[in-house]
Image (cartoon, rainbow, N blue to C red):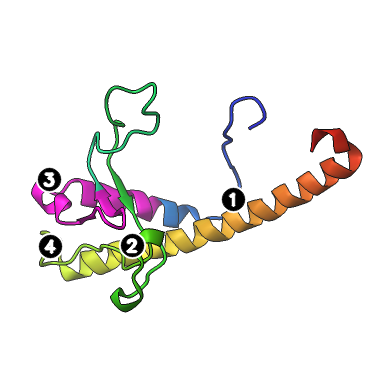
Amino acid sequence: CINVGFFYLENHSIPQNLLDNVFTQSEQLFALPMEQKLELSDSVLTRGYTRFGEETLDPINQVRGDTKEGYYIGDEVDVQHMDPKRLKGPNVWPTPSSCSMTDEKCRLFRDTMERYRGEAIRVCMELVRYFAISLTSANRSNPQLF
């Protein structure tokens, strides 16, 4: 990420079968009719479904919204401890009453996404540790850079 600002992480230890399940579950959710997907959106906490064109990553250079759909989750915080200013609160999960997915499929979606989120956080924390080690080493060898 020295020249382009991002990198592609390989051999990250997130199991391939979990990644495959994330894609399968995502395909099923995004295949729902739009009115059902919109039921899974929380604009206050920015959780759940976001539709095609809803977000703009680079508003200075973009005249249209991003060409993607998304589904966002965060730490699961119950309603009693909700803090919208800090985007803390409950996640939005599909239920048989909010969409045409069965109870079993809704549970599988949630379980898969929560498991993936946990694995991704674990990998991210490991990367942060490596970045810190790298910055500390670089700082000792060339203090003018920092």
Classed neighbour count for the residue bearing mark 1: other residues with Cα under 10 Å, few (<14), some (14–19), many (≥20): few
Q: Nearer the viewer, mark 2 or mark 4?
A: 2
- Outermost residue on the front side: it is 85
Q: Which residue is drawn at 12% across and 53% down?
A: 36
Q: Nearer the viewer, residue 126 or 140?
A: 140
**Residue nearest the viewer, comparing 57 with 26:** 57
Residue shown at 84%/46% (left/top)?
A: 137
Q: Is residue 5 above or below residue 99?
A: above
Earlier along the polypeptide chain: callout 3 or callout 2? 3
Q: Mark 3 points at which residue?
A: 34
Earlier in the chain: of badge 2 and badge 4, it is 2
Q: Quadrant of the C terminus?
A: top right
Picture coordinates of residue 111, whole percent (x, y):
35, 67
Residue type of the residue flagged with mark 3: Met
Check disc 4: other Cα within 10 Å, few if <14, some if 14-19, many if 20+. some
Q: Distance between the residues labelled 1 and 4?
A: 35 Å
State the CA–CA distance, disc 3 to disc 2. 26 Å
**Residue at the spot of label 1:** 12
In the picture, residue 95 is in which quadrant? bottom left
Number of marks present in the image shown: 4
Q: Quadrant of the N terminus?
A: top right
User: Which residue is denoted by mark 2 in the rendering?
Assistant: 84
On the image, numbered disc 4 is attached to which residue? 98
> What's the magenta region?
20-49
Mark-to-mark CA distance, 2 and 1: 33 Å
